[in-house]
Image (tube, helix red, strand yellow):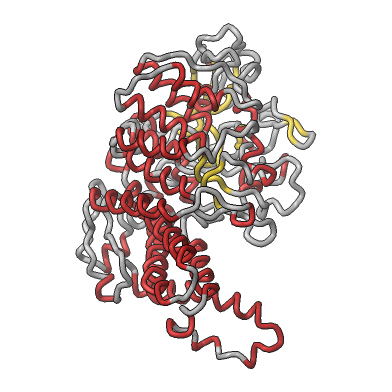
Amino acid sequence: MKMLRIIYNVLLLVLSSSIFMIIAGCGTNWLDEQPLSSISESTFWISENDAKLALTGVYAQSTVGDNSYNNHLLCLSSATDDAEYKWAGVGIIYSGYFLPSSGEVVPTIWNRSYATIFRANYFLENIESVEMDADLKAQYIAEVRFLRAFEYYYLSVMYGGVPLITKVLTIEEANTQSRNSLDEIVNFAIDELTESAIDLPSERPDNERGRIVKSAALAIKGRLLMIHKRWDEAVGTFKEIIDLNVHEIDSQYKALFEEKGENSKEIILSTNCIAGLRGNPQNQLNYHADLYGGYHETCPTQDLVDAFLMTDGLSIDESSLYDPKYPYKNRDPRLYASIFLPEYTVFRGKLFLAHPESTTSGLATLTGATGYSWKKYVTEDYEGANNNSGDDIILLRYAEVLLSYLESKIENGDNISQELLDQTINQIRKREEINMPIVTETNRDKLREIVRRERRVEFCFERHIRYFDIRRWGLFPDIVNRKVYGMKLTDDPDNYTKYRVEKVGRYRGHYIAVDKTGSFTSDMALLPIPIYEMNINKNLVQNPGY
């Protein structure tokens, strides 16, 4: 596993956070201390503080602790029907970034996950030698087991079966590992999440925000069970979270994704960001370049915009409230909270402009632009550096637990009652800021589609949820292999020639951002093993199609 670099460099990284903390805390007497270069297992794994520093090192490396906005996030959001990368082009941001030799998506996920697994294994092999409170030690161990299990959950979804490593390896051992079966990885992760949940606290004080709680372990376990259609177990797992009576649906929606909402009881798992120190770069990456000084990296699609219902609970094709001349009026409030709408959204006193004839950016210059931009992760009253805000990055919310519980009940063949709907999807729809009509449909097939749409709009652009959903529903190839449309440019598409448009829906002339027809195969639902791993380790077998 590229262990010539990973084993030694990651070991240094594990200890580097400790060394940094020691240097910072030594003051003027640091020359009198033992030389830092001699830190070793015999001198480091002694005190509770050592254990906490090592625990911090595991968090910092992990997917859970990753505060960056990597290109693989752009690529994976573009591998859905929700968004496009601004410089999108088939063979560049799509198939070109999903090749074994890619320097973006493929190695980023693999490297970070196995570096985290190494740190976790190193921690677990040494923590028992530390003298500290037994209950706290058990909690630390549970946190690390969760972080390791999370990486295996992530790897299993992205690559399928991967090498299962539960101890620190020598270089020779690392470079001769074979892939375990998908079932082995999934069962290991589920067992680890089940056992870690026992020693994790149900709640944490505000000063421990970002650390793992019991419901996080259960919810990731529930995700895995849903992916593998173990519906009865999934129902029980999500019900266990509900019965904790710890989490609740917040009355606010937009504020959840801003610093002001980071202590909400709806948030189960998040990456803790600190402005100016370990900040969140998403303000800069989502602002419109000309209007607000950002990068406008990813662009929501017209298909996603159309998925948001009207305020009467009907779709734009069914509702009498929908007016094609004013397409953004009377819509689900989550649309206004999530997406900058052209010639409609006012932000920081400026009207959001995206039509190519009204701005020097957007459709006129960006090949993957759609005329829309993400508003969900930007804060209107934030005044600091755009690339370094204190807005936490949400990885899992209680709303997901409720919708997943309902979906699992549907797929398990359980009775669907109005009481169940009111306990799940209607709690989400009736949050004070949203206040959409409640769901009363109990027909299993119709309700399934309602829940799928609800997941799409509620969790739009939240890390990989749509990507994972369309894959586990078996819709990935059909959804991705199609034309991607942007905003409406004309009411007369037959005679419009300035930009590429096509009739969509009620004969509206929408901009064609990218035509991805035929660019994805069903095999591409799994990522390839990085080519450098294949070159180093001849025991690894590549995924089909690469």
Residue sticking out furthest to the top: 320
Residue sticking out furthest to the front: 134
Residue sticking out furthest to the right: 349
Residue 402 versus residue 284: which sits nearer the camera?
402
Q: Picture quarter containing residue 519? A: top left
**Residue 107 in view:** no
Q: Left of 319 or right of it: where is 232?
A: left
Residue sticking out furthest to the bottom: 32
- Position of the N terminus, as image quadrant, is bottom left
**Residue 323 in view:** yes
Number of numbered labels in the structure image? 0
Q: Left of 268 or right of it: where is 344?
A: right
**x, y percentage for residue 353?**
69, 31
**x, y percentage for residue 210?**
56, 53
Residue at 64% of width from left, 16% of height from top?
A: 330
**x, y percentage for residue 174?**
28, 70
Residue at 30% of width from left, 73% of height from top?
A: 169
Residue at 66% of width from left, 38% of height from top?
A: 255
3 versus 104 height, above or below: below
Residue 404 versus residue 278: which sits nearer the camera?
404
Q: Picture quarter containing residue 253? A: top right
378 versus 196 height, above or below: above
184 versus 473 height, above or below: below
Residue 445 versus residue 299: which sits nearer the camera?
445
491 versus 379 height, above or below: above
Residue at 37% of width from left, 67% of height from top?
A: 121
**x, y percentage for residue 180?**
22, 56
